[in-house]
Image (cartoon, rainbow, N blue to C red):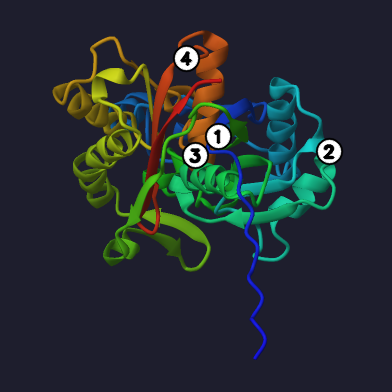
Amino acid sequence: MTDRPTLRLKQGPSATRILGVGSTQPDRVVTNDDLSKIMDTNDQWIRDRVGIIERRFADKDELLVDMAVKAGTRALEDAGVDPSDVDTVIVPNCTMPGQIPNAAAQVADRIGIKAPGAFDLNAACAGFCYGLGVASDLIRAGSSNKVLVIGAEKLTDWVDPTDRANAIIFADGAGAALVGGSDTPGIGPVAWGSAGDLVESIYLRDGQWIFQEGQSVFRWATTQIAPIAVRALELAGLQPSDVDVLIPHQANLRIVDAIAKKLRKLGAREEMVVADDITYSGNTSSASIPLALDHMRKAGTAKSGDVVLAVGFGAGLSYAGQAFICP
């Protein structure tokens, strides 16, 4: 009897890091006063409820793929990496106009990345953190060398413009991160999970419009997400006091503030910088964390070498988070 062959496995670097980030938003700015002209709302009501002052809406002919291409290209430029060096593209999103084709393959081709592994990932507003975790693990396993993760959404295609509870929140945009191998750890393990028993908290009404049970999602997020953030720190061997920058998914400013408050009670520093990108960007689902990161780097509130704690949460209900070093 002949010996059966042994499969050979690849082994990648022991650690990964973010090499560069980039983002884009549509040019069209929509204020709360603009929305008050088409629905029963006003500026103060929106600010008090979700903390948003303005958001960006894409034009009809500006597609999710278009925004993903811009953000991905800018992340490569920021990293100083040629598209030919990228072998995998992941596009977390939940708002493509159809299930087929996916966004990733066409985004990669337009950027100039030829024949990469390319797939979309749908974990809704937790999508970027899911994608970052998958990218890091792919590289450490030796399956990929450099992975471009692009959270991109055109939520305005899926929001009923007359539904004031949801139309005031969602917006469009894309944010990207290029991930590669590293001699020292730059991305911590992902802490992720789901609450499938709450699947009906966020869904497509009539198969067409995004709808969420706002109060139930608010209660869930303000009680369950801080422990997930702490778990991500524990997996990375960190304490709340080590965090320089906190970037929760930009769903609602009151939720962001509640998560930060709980982390500070557990030892996070008062001077910890907390992302508030929702104020001028709205809720951009899987794009919100990389958008906020890119904006904070440009503003100087997140600096190279800072310890960043990111945590995303949304439809599914799905959640994920990890600590990483700001590029």
* Residue underneath mark 3: 38
- Decide which of 166, 185 is in the foreground and name it: 185
Are the residues at dot 2 and dot 4 in contact (C-beta closer than 8 Å)? Answer: no
Q: What residue type is labelled 3?
A: Ile
Regarding residue 312, the answer to whether it shows in the image is no
* Residue underneath mark 2: 84
- On residue 16, which mark appears? 1
Mark 3 or mark 2: which is in front? 2
Quadrant location of residue 270? Answer: top left
* Residue underneath mark 4: 302
At 41% from the left and 46% from the top, the residue drawn is 166
Q: Residues within 10 Å of mark 4 (few under 14, many from 20)?
A: many
Task: Looking at the image, tell me whether mark 1 or mark 4 is earlier in sequence order.
Answer: 1
Task: Looking at the image, tell me whether mark 1 or mark 2 is earlier in sequence order.
Answer: 1
- Decide which of 30, 97 is in the foreground and name it: 97
Mark 1 or mark 4: which is in front? 1
User: Percent x, y for residue 246?
Assistant: 36, 24
Instruction: Assign a secondary structure to mark 2.
Output: helix
